[in-house]
Amino acid sequence: MAVQVKWLSCSLFLTVIISQIIAEVPHKRFEYKYSFKPPYLAQKDGSVPFWEYGGNAIASAENVRIAPSLRSQKGAIWTKTPTNFDWWEVDIVFRITGRGRIGADGLAFWYTQNKGAYDGNVFGSSDKWVGLGVIFDSFDNDNKHNNPYIMAVLNDGSREFDHQNDGSTQALAGCLRDFRNKPFPTRARIEYYRNTLTVLFHSGMTASDQEYEMCLRAENVHLPKNGYFGVSAATGGLADDHDVLHFLTSSLHVPGQMPLPQAPQVNEEDQRKLTQEYADYQRKLEQQKEVYRKEHPDAPIKDKDEFEEWFESDNQRELRQIFQGQSQMFEVTRELNRKLDEIIGRQERTLSLMSSLQGGGGVPVVTQQQPGQPPVQMIDTIRRHEVDAVLQNQNSILSTARDLVAFVTDVRTRTDTIISNQARQPTAQVQSVGYDMTSLVNEMRDGLNTVKRDVAAASAKLGSMPGGGPTGGSCPTCLTTTTFVVFGLVQLTLLVGYFMYRDSKQAQAKKFF
């Protein structure tokens, strides 16, 4: 029981805390007259709606370059009208880029009682301002190696900015953050709600727009009401590009005290001018009517209600709406009647088809009839989807048969073409390089016979010579057996080479026929 009581008390405590936190969250309303963002940030004439800029500032469709990367440049942009709300939140998206390792001088956000200058001494704006300045200082004047630095400076219009010490003696609060040459635009969220000033900073190292970190927070900060928003920048001996991409302002309101939108009020002078113009128009209209009556005396004169026929009364409007509704109901009913007639026609055709099939063969199908009547037998005929399936199969078979016929015809055509080409050009194919061994052996036999005859004739001549015979003595000029064999092998080799050369030439010559 004690544990349950403990958990119940904790839950009640958390509920009270959460309700208080929710109750403290202010209502936000976007104020377009105190904001600018791309695309089409600047108009064709170079102006920014609801804003004024000057000095060396340049406005384009994507951003406002407050100060370019040239030496001794100053510029600023200010709202045209003062604010009409007490608490506000401003989101600034900006880039400060330069080619140097360090830059100068910096950029500043302003909320002041009066608009500052466009070429002032404090980061491009006026000194001795009345209100708040959030300064993004990129140059280290006091040589303390504490820059780039973000600081909030309040001024009541009586103090000059301490440039020698980078405003450190006048700063309300600040933080050391690097905002130069980041891969993504840097962001700052400046909130002033219930006399509490909060500055959140996004380093620009990621593309996410939610990774803010606390830079400074100060309470009991009292700023002038109905002030002007502005952004200024300046360069010195060193120079950076100071670009502002977004300046989004939202008014903050206490929960339950959200002001209702009010109709635009017209001052007395404008009201008097409009009344006078209307009276002049009425007088001119009466004069024109008098002139028309004099020129057309026979024309019927209408009373003041001459234009009543062009307007309808409440009763006429109600009757017209009733008539239109009844006309739509009539159209819908007529469409339903047509559909019903179509259904009845289909039923009649189905019944006639069923009655016509009763006398044929087939599988009888018993249908439900009224009680007391004999059942009616129907013929189970082929269905429509079955007919469609049969027709589809037949079409597939015909298509396949056509493909087969086309393929066979193609093969036959190509075969006829090859046969005709072979008959017309029998040597068109490249024959393999072979040799007729029978003819080669016959030629070798003939050669050997010729050699034998020549040897026999030579032997006969040698035998008939004096001093020699078949059994004669020595014969120094006689052909020995070794010489004869060598001679025969050489002759055989020459013959084989000759035949091979001839066959090769003939085979190569056949390729060109």
Image (tube, rainbow, N blue to C red):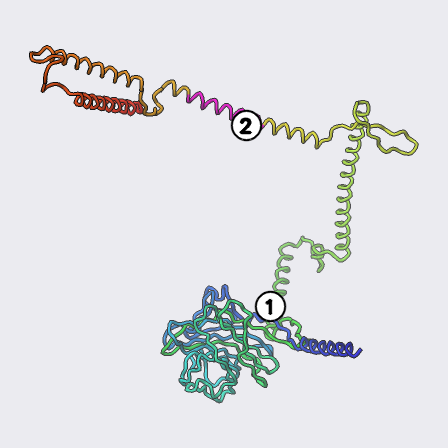
Q: In this figure, which residue is indicated by the disc labeled 1? A: 277
Residue that appears at 75% across and 47% down: 328
- Residue drawn where x is 23% and y is 24% of the image: 493
Residue sticking out furthest to the left = 466
On residue 248, the disc is: none
The one of 206 and 152 positioned closer to us in this rendering: 206
Stretch of the chain drawn in magenta: 399-418
Residue at far top of view:
464
Q: Element type at marker 1?
A: helix
> Is residue 83 found inside the magenta-colored segment of the image?
no
Q: Quadrant of the N terminus?
A: bottom right
Image location of residue 190, percent across then percent down:
55, 77
Residue at disc 2, secondary structure: helix
The label shown at residue 403 is: 2
Q: Nearer the viewer, residue 453 or 122?
A: 453
Q: Let me know if residue 402 is in the magenta part.
A: yes
For this rendering, which residue is in front, 202 or 126? 202
